[in-house]
Image (cartoon, rainbow, N blue to C red):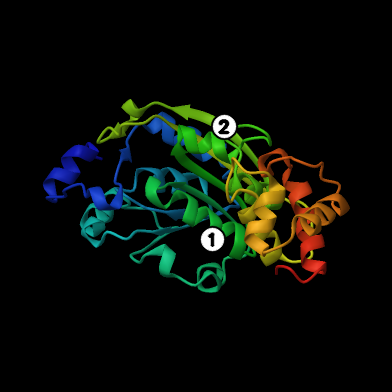
Amino acid sequence: MEELSDILKKHGFAFKKKFGQNFITDFNLLGAIVRDAGVDENSTVIEIGTGAGALTRALSKAAKKVVSYEIDRTLAPVLEETLSGCANTEVVFRDFMKEKMEDVEDGLGNYLVCANLPYYVTTPVLLRFLEEAKNCRSVTFMVQEEVAARFAAKENTPEYGAITAAIAHRGTCKVVRKVPRTMFTPRPNVDSAVVRIDFTDGFAVKSERAFRETVKLAFLSRRKTLENNLMNALHLSRERAKELLASAGVKEGVRGETLSPAELGKLSDILCDKGLIG
């Protein structure tokens, strides 16, 4: 097959900044990402952001089936060439964020997600799988290095935040590979990393909505104590806020980022039981 740059030039393709298009062409790196995702001959894989099809082709070689979503229809002639012979691959030219998750999952059974996402949609796409997916086993994303640090952070660190807790509620996250900016075309201004999130049983909560709301209020203002955030968000007296936190085993005067995801889950259960959220 021709060099990707030559194929793009032949079809008159121009990179579009609004879609965050940065392509990887190094075959060794692409193969490593596929292995990082745990893809094998029995795997069904969803990819978000087909791009020029380099990762898609690598996934196709390893997987049983690949369904890839691409928002930029001008890539169709490029993909017809780069994905030639990939009979197990379907490219869907639609905006994944506008698709219903039940339609995405329809007929797929259990599946993996593997993608070099446009960075501006990384968190929204991940949250869709965390909150809506029924059959997803794992998600492997290329993300900005600093985002990877937030995804895999531990409580009481500067990187720890709401997205960390949301991930921990559904499974485990690990940074599996660092990727320098020189590996992309065009070259971005940041280095990247590959993260893998395995969906496990996580920890149970009485209300998913209550958990999300509790996490949100815990990080409402990082400089304020959790007690103050509860008072402001739920219009509680200081005495009532202290009482609720004490019942959750939370020490007085702590900030939200000191609580582990499971501790935030326990607090959400109490707030839910009291009819304050959820």
- Pick the residue in front: 105 or 233: 233
Whole-angstrom CA distance, mark 2 to mark 1, is 22 Å
Q: Which mark is residue 23?
A: none
**Horizontally, is 13 left or right of 167 in the view?**
left
Q: Would you call the spot at circle 1 few (<14 residues within 10 Å), some (14-19), or many (20 or more)?
A: some
Q: Quadrant of the N terminus?
A: top left
Residue 35 shows in the view: no
Q: Residue at x 82, y 45 (%)?
A: 250
**Horizontally, is 26 left or right of 72 in the view?**
right
Measured as percent of width and height from the top left, residue 171 is found at: 69, 48
Measured as percent of width and height from the top left, residue 204 is found at: 79, 58
Label 2: which secondary element: strand
Say if mark 2 contacts mark 1, CB within 8 Å: no
What's under tag 1, amino acid-wise?
A: Arg
**Horizontally, is 253 left or right of 185 in the view?**
right
Say which quarter of the image contains residue 206: bottom right
What's under tag 2, amino acid-wise?
A: Val
Measured as percent of width and height from the top left, residue 231 is found at: 68, 57
Q: Residue at x 25, y 59 (%)?
A: 76
> Which badge, 2 or 1, is on the more N-terminal residue?
1
Q: Would you call the spot at circle 2 few (<14 residues within 10 Å), some (14-19), or many (20 or more)?
A: some
Label 1: which secondary element: helix
| Nearer the camera: disc 2 or disc 1 | 1
**Horizontally, is 213 left or right of 207 in the view?**
left
Seen in the picture, residue 182 relative to 71 is either above or below; the reply is: above
Measured as percent of width and height from the top left, residue 274 is found at: 81, 68
Which residue position holds label 2?
176
Residue 83 shows in the view: yes
Q: Quadrant of the C terminus?
A: bottom right
Which residue position holds label 1?
128
Seen in the picture, residue 43 relative to 178 is either above or below; the reply is: below
